[in-house]
Amino acid sequence: MPNYGDDHKVEDNGPGTPLCLLTDLPNPGSKGFKVGRRPRFFIVRIDNKVFGYINLCPHQGTPLDWKPDAFLTFQDDAIMCATHGALFNIEDGICTWGPCQGMRLAPVSVYVQGNWIKLGPL
């Protein structure tokens, strides 16, 4: 059982580390994590698919969220940078609007196994 609380800190046990239950995220929804010494990242759920990205905007290296776990637009149809409003595709992290258009969020490997969202290989 993972150890995550309000700050979603998880002990790093390498690939396969459980992050949270799929049902811990709204559909669609997002959640930020700090796993061991790895860079902070977040995951986005759409149905039974999950996508993971480092929590840094490629424009200026600022965190994307404006409050904990707030990585999506109000319509939940794109990832949004709170600093300059850049928009990114959920499925591939490519910026479609804003000062970093054409740039991409750094991906983090995550997957669903049973009811768990787990950390993938590097």
Image (spheres, helix red, strand yellow):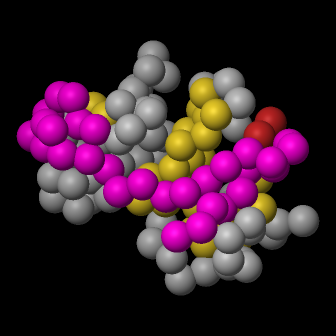
Q: Farthest front residue?
A: 121
In the picture provided, is 35 more to the left or to the right than 20? Answer: left
Q: Is residue 89 above or below residue 12?
A: above
Q: Position of residue 93 (x, y in %)?
A: 35, 41
Nearest to the observer: residue 35 or residue 47? 47
In the picture provided, is 24 more to the left or to the right than 101? Answer: right
Quarter of the rendering containing residue 15: bottom right
Total number of numbered discs in the rendering: 0
Q: Position of residue 40 (x, y in %)?
A: 48, 66
The residue at 90%/65% (across/down) is 1
Q: Farthest top residue?
A: 75
Q: Is residue 113 above or below residue 108?
A: above
Nearest to the observer: residue 91 or residue 39? 91
The residue at 18%/45% (across/down) is 103
Quarter of the rendering containing residue 89: top left
Confirm whether the magenta stretch covers residue 103: yes
In the picture provided, is 21 more to the left or to the right than 87? Answer: right
Q: Position of residue 69 (x, y in %)?
A: 54, 45
Q: Is residue 39 above or below residue 77?
A: below
Quarter of the rendering containing residue 84: top left
The residue at 41%/47% (across/down) is 65
Q: Farthest left residue?
A: 99
Q: Is residue 115 visible?
A: yes
Q: Which residues are magenta?
A: 94-122
Q: Is residue 30 visible?
A: no
Nearest to the observer: residue 107 or residue 82? 107
Q: Position of residue 58 (x, y in %)?
A: 21, 54
Confirm whether the magenta stretch covers residue 100: yes
